[in-house]
Amino acid sequence: MAGAKSSKPSKSSKSSRGSGPLGPGGVLRRGPVLAALSAAVLLAGSGSWVFYGSDWLRVEKVTATGTEVLTPEQVLGAAQVPVGAPLASVDTEEIGMRLRGRLPRIESVDVVRAWPHGIGLKVTERRPVLLIGKGKDFVEVDASGVRFDTVGQAPAGVPVLELSAAQSPSGRRFDEERLLHESVGIARDLPEAVAGQTVRLKVSSYDSVVLELTGGRRVVWGSPEQGAAKGRALTALLKAAPKADHFDVSAPTAPAVSGS
């Protein structure tokens, strides 16, 4: 017919089809997607090989720091870090548990990877606040009441507990384990200046605690209650009467001193 016009697709519409990742009809073209996936797999595999399969990132050196009584060699021997193993595969938590189990003197340990070839063991040791006599030896007790080691020589500045409460009328209520716990609290709360002068802590009952200081001096402490206040009162008395040999802080608001 004279007025009819034929409809033809424009060049722009032709050229838009089949371009990019979509094929004719909007169907996803497989080639580019498969190539991208393959590249990702290769990269992941290469990364895993670098961390676990190559010789680049393996354990070559293990160090121990923070030791005081223990030696670094003791810590390294107990840790048994697998030298030569991939650094990424080392179980740091297991090493920490192994150290605390084999060396009870260790209170905590931080096991860290030192890339590219090292493992660091940062140790914190327990410190005794009290000693319990065991024959010729001494059992060390820390501020939490943990008995963590037996030593042949008493560490300087740590009092020895002398517990003789078996015949005490309050023995049923305050048994030796309870009194040991209370004694640890007393030793822990002693001011540093006093603790360094305390040789022995004598406990015959809950209400009868006596401290023996250097130079034959004696302190009536009373019960474990109000330990911080008693420590402050004793510190003041020691400064005010340095030549005295008998102190009583069982009532910390009314302390007493005697002797020349």
Image (spheres, rainbow, N blue to C red):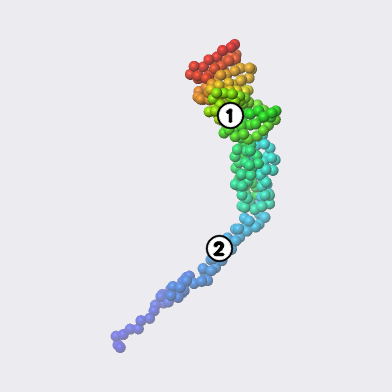
Element at label 1 = helix
**Placement of 80 over or under 168, stated as above or below:** below
Do we see residue 75 in this rendering? yes
> Residue 259 at what x, y percent from top left?
58, 12
Q: Is residue 32 left or right of residue 215?
A: left
- Structural crowding at the residue carrying mark 2, measured as other residues with C-alpha within 10 Å and reported as few (<14), some (14–19) or many (≥20): few
What number is the disc on residue 40?
2
Q: Residue at x 59, y 14 (%)?
A: 244
N-terminal of the two: label 2 or label 1? 2
- Structural crowding at the residue carrying mark 1, measured as other residues with C-alpha within 10 Å and reported as few (<14), some (14–19) or many (≥20): some
> Residue 116 at what x, y percent from top left?
63, 50
Residue at the spot of label 1: 176
Q: Residue at x 63, y 44 (%)?
A: 98
**Placement of 103 over or under 5, stated as above or below:** above
Do we see residue 122 in this rendering? no
Marker count (numbered): 2
Dividing the image into 4 quarters, which one contains the C terminus?
A: top right
Residue ranking furthest to the top: 260
Quadrant hosting residue 42: bottom right
**Closer to us: 28 or 100:** 100
Q: Residue at x 60, y 29 (%)?
A: 129
**Closer to us: 164 or 82:** 164
**Placement of 60 over or under 204, stated as above or below:** below
CA gap, disc 2 and disc 1: 67 Å
What number is the disc on residue 109?
none
